[in-house]
Each structure stands twice: as structure tokens, then as C-alpha cells.
Amino acid sequence: MLSLIGRRLALSLPLLVIVPTVTFLLAALIPGDVARTILGTDATQAQYLQLRQSLGLNEPLLTRYFTWLGNALHGNLGTSLFWQQPVTSLLDSRVPVTLSLVIGATAVATAVGVVFGVVAALRAGVVGKIVDAIAMVGLAIPNFFLGLLLVTWFAVTLRAFPATGYVPFSQSPGDWLRSIVLPVITLAVPGIAVIAKQTRDAMLEVLDRPFIRTLRAAGVPGRSIIGKHALRNAAIPVVTVIGLIFIGSLSGTVLVETVFALPGLGGLVVQATSQHDLPLIQGVAVYFTVAVICVNLLVDLTYSWLDPRVRVS
Amino acid sequence: MTQDRTRLLGIPQIPRAGAGGLRTLRYGSAMLALIAASVATACSGSGGSSADLATGGRVGGTLTVAAPSAPSSLDPAVGQPANETYSDLAYTPLIVQASDGNYQPGLAESWSYGPDNESFTIKLRPGVKFSDGTALNAEAVKAWIAHEMKPGNGGASYLATLKSVDVTGPLTLTLKFSSPAPDLEMVFGQILALGMIGSTRAVQAGSLAKETDGAGPYMLDAGATVSGATYTYVPNPYYWDKPAVHWSKVVVQVIASPTAALQALQSGQVQVAMDQPVTSVPAATKSGLKYVDPLTLLLGLGILDRSGKIDKPLGNVQVRQALNYAINRSALAKVLGSGYGVPITQMAAPGWDSYDAALAKAYPYDPAKAKQLLAAAGYPHGFTLPVVSVAAVGQDLLANALQGQLSAVGITVKPDITTNVGAYFQAMSSGTYPAATLSFGELPAAFDYEDLYGPAAAFNPFKSGSTQLAALDGKLSSASAGAEPTIAEQMQALLVDQAWFVPVAATPLVVLYQSNVTGVNATPQRNVVYMTEIGPAG
Amino acid sequence: MIAVQPQLQASPGTAQPQSFARRFMARPAGVGAAVFLLLLVLACVAAALIAPDNPGTQDLTDVLSGPSAHHLLGTDTLGRDVLSRLLYGGQRSLLSVAEGLAVVLALGVPLGLAAGYRGGGPDRALSRGAEMVMAIPPIIIILVVLAVIPGSENAAMLVFGLLGAPSMLRVVRGATLKVREEPYVTAGRLCGLSPLQVVRRHVLPRVAGPIIVQASIFAAYALLFETGLAYLGLTASSNSPTWGGMVAEASTVIEQQEWLLIPSGALIAITILAFGLLGDAVRDAAAMQDASPAHRRRATVPRDAARHAAPACPPAAPTADEAALLSVRGLSVTGQGRAGQTLVVDSVGFDVFPGETVGLVGESGCGKTVTALAVLRLLPGSLAVTGGQAQWAGHDLLAMPDRAFDALRGSALAYVSQEPQSSLDPSFTVGSQLAEVIRRHDRVPRSAARARAADLLRQVELPDPRRTARAYPHELSGGMAQRAALALALAGRPELLIADEPTTALDVTVQAEMLALLRRLARETGLAVLLITHDWGVVADICDRTIVMYAGQVVERGGVQDLFDRPLHPYTLGLLRSHPSLACAGQPITALPGRVVPPGAWPTGCRFAPRCGFADDACRAGPILLTEHRAGRQARCVHTEQVLPDEVSTR
């Protein structure tokens, strides 16, 4: 078990270095002048030079990179150019929102997608085609459009859910739930499509396998075969996809949080982009990468739990 | 960061200082209001100090306010756009401007002008503490003013002629100016915010960007605050006027989209929505919401590069005038103001101090004349005009609309629409765009000069100057109250003639609120809501 | 009812290979998508010609109007015609998609070809690199790019293409690997063609299908991405409309005009859908041969129609033998393939008496496994019983309702298959699977089930039952796994065990042990065994009687000893003669000439005639009936007398 974690971490560590490095390099290529941008046109030359010094802009690129890297390893991701606050404190306050959305969306996508997939695997006829069609549309519809549609129908017309805004769980669980229903659905839809398809394919593949026949012949009831044996074996490829859905949902929050005006990491990074606030974007990149690594690790661990053959190796 | 941006969302009208009759009238109506409120208070039976005009002293639960944007810094001296919603709660100003336009003591117990308005003496209220427990005294105010005078902060705009600050006693100080500074009461009031004193300790620690440390009724609860999204305020334990604290918690939610703000009001998520476009009013009133609409916003195009540094044609006044002829203001006003817009040809709306009715006929819609002027200036085929804009208060709509209108005379507008206000200001003040759409609230003419078109103005990144305007401004600051309007109108006429702007429409900006709150007061005398007045309805 | 599929194909080799184009055209969704995309591209390119209005023409008196005669899709916030803006906006979006696609193809295809063709070091390096890049969430990188170069859609799409190239690389690499080992590729290399020529001429055409599929998928994502960026206003273009921007604009006026959201949003969704459908259709059309079972069309034989289909042989259905445990008469199974319906098992009949071991022998493809699966009602969806009956204790197994038959599973009939390890669920321990089956039949508490499981494992001669019970199937050797499977089959105390080639996958020594075990079990418990095999040695070892099948029919029946001494059918004779154990040292083995004719191509006459040394016109004229020569000895041949004198002594 430990060796598994260790191996996955060893493979993932390069990623943790590469993504922030890439963003750092891109940022370093900025044509404009960061210090000038902060101060505006009113500042004196002395102030400008002083700011450049304090931002370390006079150092060579490599030195700046290693300084930044060193700081990052200690948990200091710099200061936001726009907010004049530490990046980590800005991001930490928004993590619960994004986590609520992404975990919620993954859970919904898994629950609904698996059910759809199993149904489609068992009933090849009309039901299977309907599931196919829903999956295709679900993947095709852009999440920002879907979000807006949901807002129009449920928030504007029906007034069933709030159109925007996030209520923290600690404040009111009921309101928290209501505030994330529409965004979670929006994020989950493409995930449902992918998971349904993958579940169906995996189930069909598993149901083809010899042991299914053996168990059936031995008298194990159909319910058990599907619900216990087939599903358990089909879970392995589906788990990979679930991991991918989680990561995809992370990216999806960029648009969905903007549509629903939720104070999460996704919405923040969009603002930061238009404000050229590179330390903030870099910070979000690091957080996203950490999330990706954690999810991959979790998927690996789940594999080993699901597939006895992996455990031994 | 940069100078006071409160223009964006509404500024009060000039109280006609010295116009006795009017003042008496206002005083009278103020008395009337006071009596009425007292009667109401007495009848409702809930006791409270007479200082509570609005609420009768009840303490409500949580007040949630929707604001369209958040400042990047909570420091009142930095003067970010829409700061007052946030500053009002945590910082009491030296002088409070009541809704009737009169000035009441805030942190300052009394004040007086010296001879020729060249000095200003303040006597502070005793026994006041900041939210960190330190005491308010003359030294603290001096330190604060020094903070304000740092480059980029408010002092540069409004205390430009400050010579010295002399502490004359533990609670008294005198400011000396090299030339008369206008309207210091307003400068130190909650609107221009220079008097919103913060604790010296916090100034030195540099923590005011993300935390509050003032002497106001509330203070920021940093733990429950997400920058740019939610700001939570809790009562300030050191506040001296306990009955004036109407809520156990105040939450400011940043809701950029007016649609979303309206929905939040309708569903009860928020009780007050600041700075909403007038288009929301019909739906709001249908849902039983109330509104006040004292604020008028001027929408137009600011020609920043008047000397033609980066966009040569703009250096020619004929070109600028052509721009003014080329647009159909009444059609634009209709679209921008959803039927409530009024076309304007000057940077003032009807009823404002510097408004000159004669100028309304200045640039009738005449594309042919525009083309003529362009040809005469040497640009018969037009030119390219990059414009920076922001997706807020209809500026983006204006930018796109202008694109369509100006293309008819051969001018290709290239709008660059930023997604948030901070980026817009960054871009506009960077001097990389020759023009910008702008929205501007009403200001006293002198402040107009400071903020809008003076050489040090925020909306003047190319620092274009005009000796005539400078001279007029000089006259304005030493003029008597009666002479001010005339000089102001002269300045306006000069601006229109030089076509430094392309004003388009004046549209109202409203504050919407639920009927279970009261104290949402904005009047012609003070057309900005003062947050601390809002309380639960009786 | 679960559809279960055996390893064999329903109708091998009967479909004509169709051209890719024809297969693609057969898919209406794909064709529709392709047509739509073509029209869209043309319309957008020709926007200047066909758009009703200029995209920037404002009409401030007619803002936010719904669809009307003058403005087919309504007007926006400045009175501009929505339809025109969509057409012009499409130029931008489609161009961006093309940009990204160009990068993906330019990078992914050559690198994928190189990785797949070269293999080794370059392949490993490229694959690793691809994996790394694919793990990066692209949105973050793109946002950094946009923060550095604001508003540049070209830069964004370029980088998006860079980040999407690894997927294409992987796909191309995989396809190249498959093709690389093909004979004609090797031939090309040997002919002296340079690798580049080989790749271009032989590999690339085969890889084109997956490339198009992946390109379609990428195009869908690229469009999704591009419109998203435009919606956020990050790629704001000053002059021209964008689809994403139009959605953003519509979102600001939802309360005033709900319609405005629809034209732009729906068009984006439909275009993405079209890309997706196109990709799916191309993939289906291109990958017919190596389609996984999941993608194969699960055609089912319409049961009613099948029952009326006449089997090739007239139903020779003498009544079932009441003394027999299992009495099969006239069993026919038909398969549904692309070429239509094919008879796979033709009117097969046999008996299994209590306690006896019957061998069902034949070459692979003769239908013996299908027969067994038919009796067990475990046929895959593409095969169905189209005639006959299987009598068990007075009831026809094939006609019973599902519920009734399920009750017999495991408790009356049991099954052991060929592959020992894959016949057990790899995710559960042997013990837990055993216990599950036991509890299904016995309804005892867990502890009792576990105890019985240990007993069963002991019964099948597993050395350490407790350890085996805790083990997972993959941890067992072939022999041990087969014993465990046997234990599973016996858990329900069945009366008949149908064993499908139970020893084929085992080592010779283990085989002998397994057969000995079977023999012992049968003797001790009175278990009847229907043993399906192609190995005469196995038949000789433990079977009492034998049924020989050829080309879907029973061709000979009889006791083992008698059959070995005096085979009646030329096929049996041939098989016995060609058995290695009968070979004379120094002389070549007399193997049967020719190959068995597959189902669907069976001649009307004797199916063995093409390979038979005794065949004449009488054999080929019409169907040969199974006739009884002596008590308990039947053969489907008219020349048995000629076979008889050729006595082959066995053992």
C-alpha cells in the first residue's frame, strides 16, 4: 500500500513542478511592466524603482524562479497584485466553494451516470438508445449555456433556486444546498454522459466474461450477478473515468462559477486573468495541480482496493 | 493605488453654502422630519435616543446588502470605486452629512474655517476608540492625513493645497492651506471620505487593505470574509454610540449582475441592492420592492488623448467635435437608459450646478457635418479609435453602440471591454488607450476639475491641461457661493467647445430595497445612501 | 434476462467486407452531422454573401425583438440582426477550431507515427511526455497565456492545440502499433522501402480512421473551449461578433428577453453535437473488425420467427427416453449475423442417464459447446434455440419459464467451463464465491456456508482448503482454479454436470488428476457428467458413452469401447486414426484431409462428404439420416459397412 502511494507520488511530483514552472515561464514573458501596472501613472520614479526592487524584478529570471519555487515549497505563493493580500489567504477562503461544487458534481455524475449506464447495458433496445441520445446531448451542450438555461427556467421563471450566490454550509445547510443545486447539475451533466457511456461499455464487457456464465450456471440470482459481481468488476475502468470527471469539473468551475457568481477558485481565476494578476493565477494553478495529484492518488488507491490483482504487485 | 473613484457611482449635489434661504428651507424640513420621526418613534413605543431618526432603536438580525463591485483595498484613503458601501460601516468620518444635506458632528465635535478659508480647525469628540482599542486623538488625525497625502491616495486630489497640520491640543488640530480649499466639510464627510480616520497602528502596519480599523459602528470579520465576494461586518465593541448600531451583523455580497441582484432581492437573499440600473425598477416595484433614485450617472466617451499623442487625429479639435456631431444621442439615451435616459451634450445633467441649458443645443445629430469636419481636419476616410470600456453600468453597451454610430462617418471604434472595474481602471489610467467610455456621477464643479479633467485628474491619464480651465478653477475656489454656478457653467462651456468629451446620456442609478428595512435615504441634498442609517423597519 | 456470450462468434466469416465509405453512409446520424457541418462552414464562409444584414448594423429603435419576418432570429441589445451575427461569428469560431486542429494534427500525427513505428526509447519518451501533458488542466495554462497576451484568441487556440496533441499522439501511436506487425508492412520493409515510404503508403491509410475520430472529438472540445473563452470576455474581439460573446450578451438581458439566449447557445450545442456524431460514425465504420464486444450490435433472433424456421433436417424426434436424466431431442440453434440467420446446431439429440459420463466429441466449430449452452440456457443474445426439447424430470428445459429454470441452476444442472481462472470472479475470494453459491442453495448462516465451502474444497482434493478459500482466483494455479470451479459447480448438489473442455487448458499431469477426480466424484456421488471435449484420450479415460458431432449434427452415438473398436462413421474413423497415440513409429500420422465447412455453407447432402474417402453421389444427393445399426449404436452414414471392416484397435 505504501509503495503504491510512494510510486504514484513519485510519478506525480514532476507534474507539481512542471505546471507552476510553465505558468511562471509564461508569466515571465509578459510584455508589459508589472510594477508600472501596479502603480499606475501617478507614481514617482523613486517609487517605481523601489517597487521593482521589492518585487524582485531586477533579479535574473532563474534567480526569481528559484526564489519563487522556494517560497512555494514553504507555502508562500506570493502576493496578489490586485488585492495586495497573500495569495494563499485569498485562495483558501474560496476552496470550500469550489470543493462543494466539484465533489457534488462528481458524486451526482457518478450516481446518475452509473445507473444510466447499467440500465443501458441491460436493456439494449429503446432504453439504450435514449441513454445514448441523452449522453450525446449532455456532452455537446456548453456548460455556460446550460447554466444560463437552468437559471432562466428555475431561478427566473420558477424562482425555485437562487440565481447566484453561495451560502456557506456553516451558515445554513438548507440554503447551502439550494445555492449549489443548479451549479452542481450544470457541472455534472457532461460527467453523467461520460460515466454512463463508460459504465455501459464496462458492464457489457464484463457481462461477456466467462465467470459471469459460471456464476449464472451455479444458480446465483441475476440481481446478485449484476449488482455485485458485474458492477464490482466494471467499477475499475469506471473509477478512472470518475477521476477524470473530477478533474474536468475543476476546469468546468471556471465557467460555472462565473455564470452563477459563486466565490470560488474558478471565478477568481477569470477575474485574475483580466486583471493580469499573475501571482494569483499561478496560485490557482498550483492548487489545481495539487487537486489533480490527490485525485489520481485516490483513483490508484481505489484500484488496488477494487482489483485484487493490483494489490499483489 | 489610484485616486478616488467614487465618481463612478454617485456623488452628492453641492449644498448651496451660504444661500441662506434655501438653507433655512432645508433646515425647516429637517426639523419637520425630526418631529415626524419622533412622533413615529413615540407611537411605536420602542424607546431610543433622539439621534435615531430612522429606526427607533430596534436591533435587527443580519442585514445583507448587494453591491455591484468590491474594492481591491478596504483602506478608505485608497479610495477604490464604490468604497463607501464598505467604508461607511467601519469608519465614522469627522463630519457626517445627513440626508438633508446638513453637516453633523462625526468624529469631530466642532469645526471652523479660518480667515479666507485658508485654515480649518477641528475639535475632536472625546472618549472615542478605534476598533483595536487605541484612542482617537489629534495625533491620530494628523497621521491619517499624512496617510491620505501619500501619492495615489485621496489627499492628492482634495487637499492639494495643504501646507501643514498643526496639533494644538490633545483633541484639537488646525490645517493650513496655501490657497483656499473648497468645501472641506464635504472633503471630510463620508462622501469624499478623507475624514474617515483609521487607527494609526493599522496605518503603520499596512493592514488596512484587507482589514478595517476605524471608529465606526461595525468592523470587518475577516474570518467570514472572502475578498471580492462576501464581506461580513460585526458590531465594533468600542463604538461610542451604541444605539446607532442597528444590526448584529451586516453582510455585503458582491453581485455584479443586476439581474442577479434583483433576483436576490426578490428571494429575500439580500435586503438592499446598491447602484442598480433603472431597468430593474419595473420588475422591482412589481415584486413589492422599494427604491430611491437620486443618483444620476452620466454616460459618455472620454477623449483622453486630447493632444493626439497616441492617436493623432484626436489632437485636432475639429475631429473631436466631429465625434460629437456623429452620434444620435436621443436614440442612444433610449437604449442606454431603457427609456429613462436623457440625452446630454455636456458633462452635467439637468439640475446640476454646472449645467447650462444653453449648451443642450450644442451638438445636434449631424453625420454630414461630422464628415465635413473630419475632411477639413485631414481625415476624410476616418481613422481608428481604440476605446477601453468595462462590462458594467452599461458602458459596454455604449461602447458597442458608439462603434455602430461612428462607423457611419468612417471612424472605426475598437472597443476593448474589460470584465471588471479594477482592470478597467488599470487600463484607463495606464495611458495606453486614447479614449475610454466613462460613467460619472455628479460632483461640485471644483471637484469635477480635480477628478475629471484637471491635469491631476484620474480620468486624465495623459495629463492634458488647459490654462483657461486652470484659471477658471482658481477663480472657482475663491469664489463666493453665489458666483460658483456661473464660473462652473463657463468651465462646462469651455469643455463642450473643446470637445474633450462626448457626453451621451444621463441615466438614473437606483438603490432597491425591501420594505422591511428603512433608512435607505438618498435625497437631492445628499444623493448617496449612508449605510449606517439603514435599520429594520418598525 | 442477462445476455451472456461465449467466446465463439455467431457467424464467422459470412459478412462481405464493405468499403469504409459504404459503411459510413449507412449511418444516418453521421451523414447528417457531416452534411450539417459542411453547410455550416459554407454558410459562414459565405456570410458576406448570404447574411441578411451587416453584423454591425445597429437599429436602436428595434432592440431585443424576438424572431420576425425581417429578423429571422430576432435582434440583440443594439438592434443588430442575430442571424447575420451568427454567420459572421461562425467564421471566427470555426477558424479557431481549425487553428487548434492544425496544431493537433501537425504535432500529434507525426509524433504518434514515430512513437508507434519506432518503438523503444523514442516511444517511451514520447508516451511519458504525452502522459504528463495530458494530466495538465488546459484551462489554467490558457488563462496564463491570456493574462500575458490579453485577448489573443490565436495564442489561446495554439496552446490549446499543443495541449491536445498528446491525445492524438496516443491514438495514432496505438493504431500504428497494431498496423506495424501486419504482413504487408513487414513486406514493405523487406522490399527496401524506407520507413517514411512504408509509413506513408501502408500505415497512414490504416490509421486515417482513428485520426479522423480523434480530430472530431478534438474539434468538439475546441469549439466548446473557444466559445467559453468568448463568453468570459477573455478573447474579446472589438469588431466582430462571437458566438460565446453573444451568449454573454444574452445573459445580461434574461429578464427582458429570454429568447436571445437560444440562437447562439443552441447553435454552439448543435455544432458540437455534430462533431461528436461525426466522430462516432467514423469510428463505428472504421473499426468494425476490431470492435469490442460492447460495440458489436447485439442482434437478437426474433424468437417467434425462429421457431417457425425449418431446420435443415426434418425433425427426427422420437420421444424422449423417460429413464434418462436429460433427454435432448431435435435441438436446433440459429445464430443472427449480419448475413441473416444461420443454423448452427442442427436437430441434435442425445440422452444422459443417471450416474453415467457421456462424452460429446467433435472438432472446434461443430456446435458442441453451443449445444451445451443451449441446454443450460446460457446462449448469448445472437444465438437462439429454434427447435427441439430437452426433457428433464418430465419437463422441457427449453420451454420452462425463466423462474422455473433458474431454480434448477446449480441444483440440478451444473456447469464447468474451459478456462479455469477466468471462470471465477477475480474480485472476490474463492471462499466468498463458494459461500455465496452455497447460501443461495442451502440458506444457511455464513459460518455454516464457510464450513461447507471448506468441505467442498476438500472434496475436490485441494490440499489446503482454508488457504484456498482465502485466495483470489488469480493466485491459484490452473489446476487449483479448475478444482475450485468444480467445487462451485458441485455446491448446489447437482445431478448433472456439464463440463466444457475442463482439462484442455491444463498441463498433462494435472489433466490426468482432474479426470481422476471427476471419475471419483461421479462414482461417489452418482453425478452424471456430460463431458464436452475434442480429445479422444479424455473420452477413453472416463466416458461411458460417446456422442460424436460434426458440422452441427450428431454423426455417431455409442458406448466408448464399442466406438473405439468399431467406429461406424468415416469421420470417427478418421479421428481415431489420426490420434497420436495410435501412430506407428516412423510413419506419418494419417490426418483427416480438408477442413470442416462452417455453418451457413453446409451442403444439403452429407456434410462430411467433401473429406470422406467413401463418399459418392448418394451421399451428396440429400440429407443423411441418423440410423440405428445395433442397440445403442447410431451413425449418420450410408456406407457404414465400408467403414466397419477397417477395424482399428485402440489401446
Image (cartoon, coloured by chain):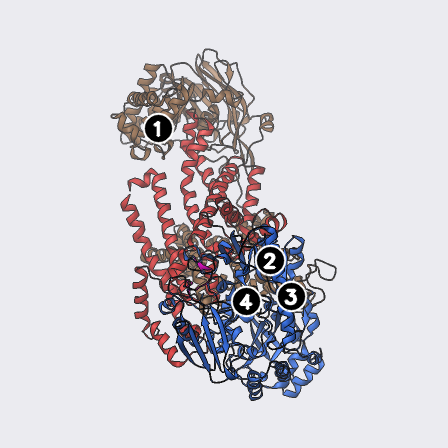
- Which chain shows up in brown? C
Mark 3 in CB contact with mark 2 (< 8 angstroms): no
* Quadrant of the rendering where the N terminus of chain A is positioned: top left
Circle 2: residue type? Ser
Crowding near the residue tagged with mark 4, few <14, some 14–19, many ≥20 C-alpha atoms within 10 Å: many
Asked if the magenta segment contains residue B215, the reply would be yes
Residue at mark 2 to residue at mark 4: CA–CA distance: 56 Å
User: Does mark 3 fall on the same chain as mark 4?
Assistant: yes
Task: Identify whether C486 is placed above or below B266.
Answer: above
Asked if the magenta segment contains residue B245, the reply would be no
- Which chain shows up in red? A
Circle 1 residue: C432
Circle 4: residue type? Ala
Residue at mark 2 to residue at mark 1: CA–CA distance: 83 Å
Give the mark toward the camera: 2 or 4.
2
Residue at mark 4 to residue at mark 3: CA–CA distance: 21 Å
Circle 3: residue type? Ala
> Residue C43 falls in which quadrant of the image?
bottom right
SS assignment for the magenta stretch, majority: loop
Task: Identify whether C396 is placed above or below A268.
Answer: above
Circle 4 residue: C236
Residue C356 percent location from the top left of the image: 38, 15
Circle 1: residue type? Ser
Q: Which sits earlier in the primary sequence, circle 1 or circle 3? A: 3
